[in-house]
Image (tube, rainbow, N blue to C red):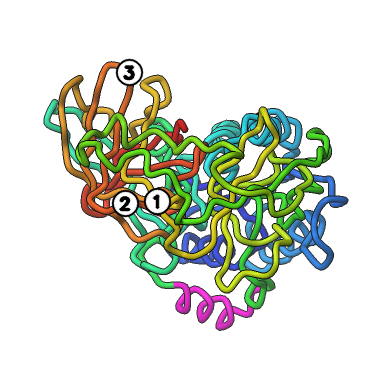
């Protein structure tokens, strides 16, 4: 008897081709479509709705002759992903809802329903890979590996997955490149073949972020203060360049360090490194958000891609927020180990040293990093394997 696998069918080309490949490999394939977001009032015009996604998923399932199950998980999505977003933005942090969506929805609720259906495996259209190894402790562990397509590797979005969530997962497109996925979809005339890749917030789509956040976070006018490189306070100019504790702390600004250049509608709507939506003109080079002060409702900006306020050499992750995909690779207090790290999706991996202290984990980069953003996830890799992750504290 063939093994049963339940695949998350989103209506997109990746999951559609993944379902096709599983069928070709002889699995008993069932599809699951998850309704996670129903409020289309905040999405930008022209963005696909969940109804359209579901319609395409039904068409693909019919073409492949596989049963399609539909589950409404919108309440959990609202409480575990959207509410988390509002809470983080209210604190002046920039969350990554896609990472939480995968941990709390796609590989939590999804696994629960798959078990109810008697599945041996679950599968998704993510561009990543999984295998099993024996750790130094003699136990068997699942490894989360980067996808073979360097332009589409999505392992970063799965950086909060657990061993329990990983052990029965299949990633059918992880070993092929995107153009090949498109070619297979077109060759099989799948209904999803010409659909564009999804963008924006996981399951929500592209949004006008301030409009989205104003559902709960009220607009409040405040000052935009520009920090020129000449007036910039080089807080660390005399500090030890290897002092990871000092280097992990963000720069502290005051209005007296710069000059007021405009107004904004609420500091909680902006994020470090943001360039668009500032409505500030008259500069020879682009201007970026350097910092936000939620308590005083101030945004600090600077001009130029190389403004010193955009760069930091270290970051900190609290001890209780460190997540290990491979728990057997935990660092002991006082231990230092080199890894390659990324602090955002698609960022090339950066060389760094991880240093474990009682209060948490410090990541000291070989080269200063641009736009280190509190709330975003730092993920560290050993070769192609994603070992662990955690949200940047401040």
Circle 1 sits on which residue?
311
Under circle 3, the secondary element is loop
Vertical placement of residue 288 versus 282, above or below: above
Identify the image quadrant of residue 15: bottom right
CA distance for labels 1 and 3: 24 Å
Magenta segment, principal secondary structure?
A: helix
Q: Along the polypeptide, which appears first: circle 3 or circle 2?
A: 3
Between 163 and 275, the residue placed more toward the observer is 275
- Which residue is found at the position 73% from the left and 66% from the top? 59
Numbered range of the magenta stretch: 178-190
Counting other residues with Cα less than 10 Å from the Cα at mark 1, is it few (<14), some (14-19), or many (20 or more)? some
CA distance for labels 1 and 2: 6 Å
Circle 2 sits on which residue?
368
Q: Are marks 1 and 2 in contact (CB under 8 Å)?
A: yes
Is 246 placed left or right of 151 in the picture?
left
Is 279 placed left or right of 370 in the picture?
right
Q: Position of residue 283 (x, y in %)?
A: 62, 69
Under circle 1, the secondary element is strand
Between 122 and 376, the residue placed more toward the observer is 376
Circle 3 sits on which residue?
359
- Which residue is found at the position 60% from the left and 42% from the top? 97
Q: Position of residue 188 (x, y in %)?
A: 58, 78
Q: Along the polypeptide, which appears first: circle 1 or circle 3?
A: 1
């Amino acid at each position: 008897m063939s093994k049963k696998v339940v695949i998350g069918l989103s209506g997109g080309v990746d999951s559609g081709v993944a379902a096709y490949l599983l069928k070709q490999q002889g699995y008993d394939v069932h599809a699951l479509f998850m309704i996670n977001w129903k409020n289309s009032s905040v999405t930008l015009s022209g963005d696909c709705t969940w109804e359209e996604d579901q319609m395409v998923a039904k068409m693909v399932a019919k073409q492949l002759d596989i049963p399609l199950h539909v589950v409404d998980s919108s309440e959990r999505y609202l409480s575990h992903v959207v509410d988390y977003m509002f809470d983080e933005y209210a604190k002046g942090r920039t969350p990554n809802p896609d990472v939480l969506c995968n941990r709390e929805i796609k590989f939590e609720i999804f696994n629960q329903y798959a078990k109810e259906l008697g599945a041996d495996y679950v599968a998704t259209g993510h561009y990543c890979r999984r295998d099993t190894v024996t750790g130094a402790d003699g136990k068997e562990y699942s490894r989360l590996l980067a996808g073979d397509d360097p332009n589409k590797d999505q392992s970063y979005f799965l950086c909060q997955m657990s061993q329990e969530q990983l052990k029965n997962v299949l990633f059918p497109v992880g070993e092929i490149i995107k153009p090949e996925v498109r070619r297979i979809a077109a060759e099989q005339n799948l209904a999803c073949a010409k659909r564009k890749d999804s963008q924006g917030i996981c399951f929500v789509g592209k949004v006008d972020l301030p409009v989205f956040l104003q559902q709960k976070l009220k607009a409040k006018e405040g000052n935009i203060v520009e920090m020129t490189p000449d007036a910039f306070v080089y807080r660390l100019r005399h500090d030890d360049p290897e002092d990871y504790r000092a280097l992990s702390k963000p720069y502290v600004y005051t209005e007296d360090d710069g000059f007021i250049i405009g107004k904004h509608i609420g500091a909680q709507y902006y994020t470090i490194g943001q360039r668009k939506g500032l409505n500030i003109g008259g500069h020879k080079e682009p201007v970026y958000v350097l910092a936000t002060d939620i308590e005083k409702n101030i945004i600090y900006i600077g001009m130029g891609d190389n403004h010193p306020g955009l760069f930091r050499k270290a970051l900190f992750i609290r001890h209780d927020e460190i997540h290990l995909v491979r728990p057997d690779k935990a660092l002991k207090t006082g231990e230092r180990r080199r890894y390659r790290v990324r602090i955002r999706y698609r960022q090339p991996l950066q060389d760094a040293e991880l240093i474990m202290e009682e209060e948490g984990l410090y990541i000291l980069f070989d080269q200063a990093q641009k736009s280190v953003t509190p709330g975003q996830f730092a993920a560290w890799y050993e070769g192609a394997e994603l070992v662990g992750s955690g949200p940047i504290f401040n």
